[in-house]
Amino acid sequence: MEFSVPLKMNNDFRRAYRKGRSAAEPCLVVYARRNNSRTNRVGYTVSGKLGCAVVRNRVRRRLREIYRLNESGFRRGFDLVVVARGRSVSAEYARLERELLRACASLGVLEQKEAGE
């Protein structure tokens, strides 16, 4: 990834939940918080209630790939936590991508496209 690193520490996740802003979609919830650095830190949460390890890892891989492919459109300097909801297990890839980008846009994490583009 160009300018992103994984968010791994429990206290960083909790800080994003507590002090960050959130945007909810049917398949996922995104929490965003400024981190005052030149990189984004991204973490993914998939509950054990969604299924066995195979199912959870598949959802996590899809979300990670969506972020990786669209990373150039994200503004830098944010902690992002993506929380998968139950519908994400059966959702198509295109729907997950659309919802993740819509949630990030509503939080102001995506770069603003100019009118001519």
Image (cartoon, helix red, strand yellow):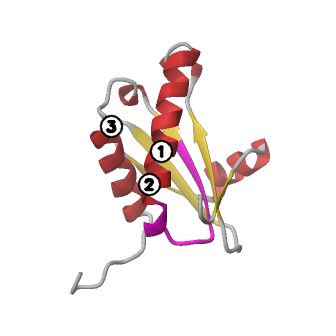
Q: Which residues are magenta?
A: 71-82
Distance between the alpha carbons at the discs numbered 1 and 3: 10 Å
Residue 74 lies in magenta, yes or no? yes
- Identify the element where label 3 is drawn: helix
* Residue located farthest toward the left when viewing the structure as drawn: 116
Q: Which mark is residue 55?
A: none
Amino acid of disc 1: Glu
Type of amino acid at the residue the image marks with label 3: Tyr
> Which badge, 2 or 3, comes first in the chain's sequence?
2
For mark 2, give the secondary structure.
helix
Q: What kind of residue is marked 2?
A: Leu
Residue 109 left/right relative to 100: right
Give the alpha-carbon distance from disc 1 to disc 2, as whole Å: 6 Å
Judge from the rendering whether residue 35 lies leftward or rightward of residue 62; answer left or right: right
Determine whether the residue tagged by mark 1 lies in a helix, strand or loop.
Answer: helix
Image quadrant holding the C terminus, namely bottom left
Q: Is residue 100 left or right of residue 51?
A: left
Residue drawn 69% across the image and 68% down it: 35
Which residue is disc 1 drawn over?
65
Name the disc covering residue 93, or none.
3
Image quarter where the N terminus lies is bottom right
Task: Find out whether the residues at labels 1 and 2 contact each other: C-beta distance under 8 Å.
Answer: yes
User: Residue at left 28%, top 42%?
Assistant: 94
> Crowding at label 2, few (<14), some or many (≥20) Cα neighbours within 10 Å?
few
The residue at the point 48 percent across, 52 percent down is: 67
Q: Position of residue 115 (x, y in %)?
A: 23, 85
Q: Residue at x 42, y 74 (%)?
A: 111
Q: Is residue 104 shown above or below 114?
A: above
**112, above or below 4, in the image:** below
Label number found at residue 69: 2
Is residue 108 something one can see in this rendering? no
